Image (cartoon, rainbow, N blue to C red):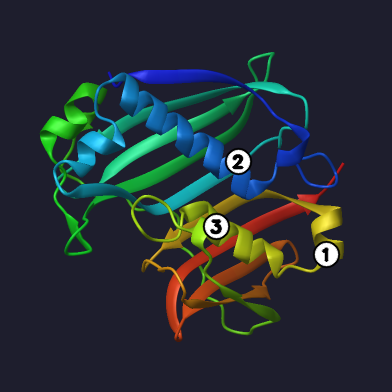
Amino acid sequence: MAKKYTEKYTIPSYECDRSDYLKIPTLVKILIKISGSQSEELGVSDAYVHSFGLGWIILQHDIKIIRLPKSGETVALTTEATSYNKFFCYRKFWIHDEEGNECVLMETTFAMMDLKARKMGSVLDEIVAPFESEKIKRIKRGEKILPVEEVKAKKDYLVRYYDIDDNQHVNNAVYLDWMLDVVDIDWMSDYIPVAISIKFNKEIRYGEIVDSSYQQGETELSLHQVLVNEAVCAEANIRWQPKD
């Protein structure tokens, strides 16, 4: 069975929105961070991976939110690298409250990128072996994402220095920031995400101009895309419900 890793985390107010809920991009950041902490503990840190000329990239997040934690809460962040095949690695993340109730489940598909060629490479057994993940042959598919067809609103963004991570491209959490920033402020004030699927198709680099747009689908479903020069670099579907 794959190894699990857990950290306690107290949510500071500056990581929350004006209703005191944990910000969605920050939720992703703190979960991804604990996968890095586990990797370091097992001796396969990012520096070790980079020594092979490789880096981890994220292809898709599927997030289920039962209850979004709030400012001041102490939660347990847990991760498990469940399985992998020749090209993809699959990892689960959880957030539990102090009573042990599951608040968030995130399932993420990772791959390895050749840092020089900027292309996806094969998963190396020596990198994933310490996690004791199950080796499988089948390819797991994430949630299907509906495309944007009728744009309701959009904004342009210049990719800044602090948007870039150590793989020299935009960090995955920044895409969610761009996507949510386009949504009407009244909607953001009255509704909360309960399910998010986001797929990353193409990396974005420093200095590029990004076009973030969205469409209101069903009553409580929004469709999102991030483009550079009309190429879809990321797309997402977000399901919402009214705040309590």
From what the image shows, is residue 13 above or below residue 165? above
Q: Nearer the viewer, mark 2 or mark 3?
A: 3
Assess disc 2: are there few (<14), some (14-19) or many (≥20) residues with their C-alpha within 10 Å of its C-alpha. Answer: some
Outermost residue to the top: 99
Q: Is residue 70 visible?
A: no
Q: Which residue is mark 1?
A: 185
> Quick one: 195 or 230, which is closer to the camera?
230
Q: Secondary structure at mark 2?
A: helix
Give coordinates of residue 68: x percent, y percent: 71, 37
Residue at 27% over, 20% down:
42
**Residue drawn at x 85%, y 55% as measured from the top left:** 189
The answer to the question of whether label 1 and label 2 lie on touching residues, with beta carbons closer than 8 A, is no
Residue 209 in the image: x percent, y percent? 51, 79
- Which residue is at a point 75% across and 39% down the rendered structure image? 14
Residues at discs 3 and 1 in contact (Cβ within 8 Å): no
Of discs 3 and 1, which sits in the foreground? 3
**Image quadrant where one finds the C terminus:** top right
Above or below residue 182? Residue 41 is: above
**In the image: residue 217, left or right of residue 62:** right
Measured as percent of width and height from the top left, residue 230 is found at 46, 86
Instruction: Name the residue beneath numbered marker 2.
Output: 27
Q: Amino acid at mark 2?
A: Leu
Front one among 39 and 188 = 39
Residue 26 appears left or right of 42: right
Sequence-first tag of 2 and 3 = 2
Q: Position of residue 95 (x, y in %)?
A: 58, 28
Task: Residue under label 3, please give it.
Answer: 174
Whichever of labels 1 and 2 marks the residue nearer the N terminus, that label is 2
The amino acid at mark 3 is Val
